[in-house]
Amino acid sequence: MAEEPKGSQYKNVTDLVDSLLRRAITLRASDIHFEPARDSFGVRFRIDGFLHPAEVFEKDGKDEIVSRIKVLAGMEIMEKRFPQDGHFEIYGEGGKIYNLRVSTFPTTFGEAVVLRLLDRKDAMMDLVGLGFEFDQIEDVKRMIVFPYGMSLITGPTGAGKTTLLYSILKAINTPRNNIVTIEDPIEFQMDTIRQLQVKESIGVTFPKALRAVLRQDPDVIMLGELRDTETVQLSFQAALSGILVFSTFHTFDVPGIIIRFLEMGIPRSVISHVLIGVVSGRLVRKICEKCKEPYVLNDFEKRIFGDSFSGISLKKGRGCNACENSGYLGREGVFEVVAFDEDIKSYIMEGKNISQLGTILRQKGSKSLWDAMMKKVSRGVTTVEETLRVIGIKDTRNSA
């Protein structure tokens, strides 16, 4: 049995791990971190984007805790030299199903473990419930019914890309479509959709899997990520052959995507012909409804926002038991949606300066992430403080 602090409420290591999982679900944690240190074994929960200490155990009990998690995730218990990945499911209250993606990582003081918790219901949300503005959701709905082409989802880790991809698949999953996914890992199993797990250890890479999928007569292909040049080139070939492709890509704006594709050898003519649109997303914390109260901008915020909120009663959470005194409870998506019309396609194909594409998009009325955030602040969904954090603007007046 894992050695725990005196007075431990846990019967055994199985009860310990189960209790931590249940508590994480209750607290709406998105991740659980098991962290070995020189003299202890700590646990932290990531809640609404921030890590919070949850437990600290004696270091001698860490191996049994990690082994229990490995058993649940179908991992090699004795393999401690290399990182491993696995997953398992548990049931919550009311029959809710939670998928847990598990990653182990060898460190100086032992194996660190991170569990990503995904609520199947949240991952299968309707598009309208994700936080899009009305005009944005209309653009997205048009993007996902094209007969062929490629639509991309961008954003940092933990920005809700997986949830958006699964919501799109749910929206287009009809008997008329043959949908095939290539994922690493498969987050959720979906009825009537063929899902393939990438396993690089046995040679099942994204490019190899994609070549095989193209022989399965797909109407739609979802790639978990465009990781390398070969996968990108094959994805464009698939889109050109009459397949609708969805994937994620690690850049933060549309010009950056175009430049990366050009660097990977994709011709401008192909980019302009294939790309349907790009959705960039972030998750923002929502103001706790239990302790929401009026808020007045400070001097720094006034300099940033000017008169943007003139005549609007801003809100902020005071902090209460319901939100663990954070002033926030839950998160919601905020998006920038760029649908590629003929003007944008022509701009790309004619060899113009791609770095200026952002300016062209603004001139055409495309709403940026900043614009979408401002709307959520105006409606009392989130705060100016959260807007500055997500966009990356810091008040350095009191910095050392």
Image (cartoon, rainbow, N blue to C red):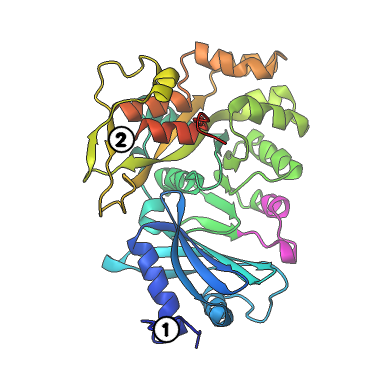
**Residue 74 higher or lower than 223, as above or below:** below
Query: Residue 312 in the image: x percent, y percent?
Result: 26, 21
Q: Residue at x 39, y 87 (%)?
A: 11
Residue 153, which numbered label? none
**In magenta segment, residue 210:** yes
Secondary element type, mark 1: loop
Circle 1: is it few (<14), some (14-19), or many (20+) Cα within 10 Å? few
Residue 14 occupies quadrant: bottom left
Q: Residue at x 41, y 24 (%)?
A: 301
Question: Real-space Cα distance between discs 1 and 2?
Answer: 44 Å
Residue 342 lies left or right of residue 168; in this view the side is right
Residue 107 occupies quadrant: bottom right
Q: Work out whether residue 346 or residue 329 is closer to the camera in this orientation and state it.
A: 329
Q: Which residue is mark 2?
A: 381
Query: Residue 3 in the image: x percent, y percent?
Result: 50, 85
> Do callouts 1 and 2 mark residues in contact (Cβ within 8 Å)?
no
Q: Work out whether residue 192 or residue 290 is closer to the camera in this orientation and state it.
A: 290
Q: Magenta segment, which residues?
A: 197-212
Q: Name the kind of residue labelled 2 in the image.
A: Val
How many marks the image carries: the answer is 2
Q: Residue at x 31, y 54 (%)?
A: 324
Secondary element type, mark 2: loop
Q: Which residue is mark 1?
A: 6
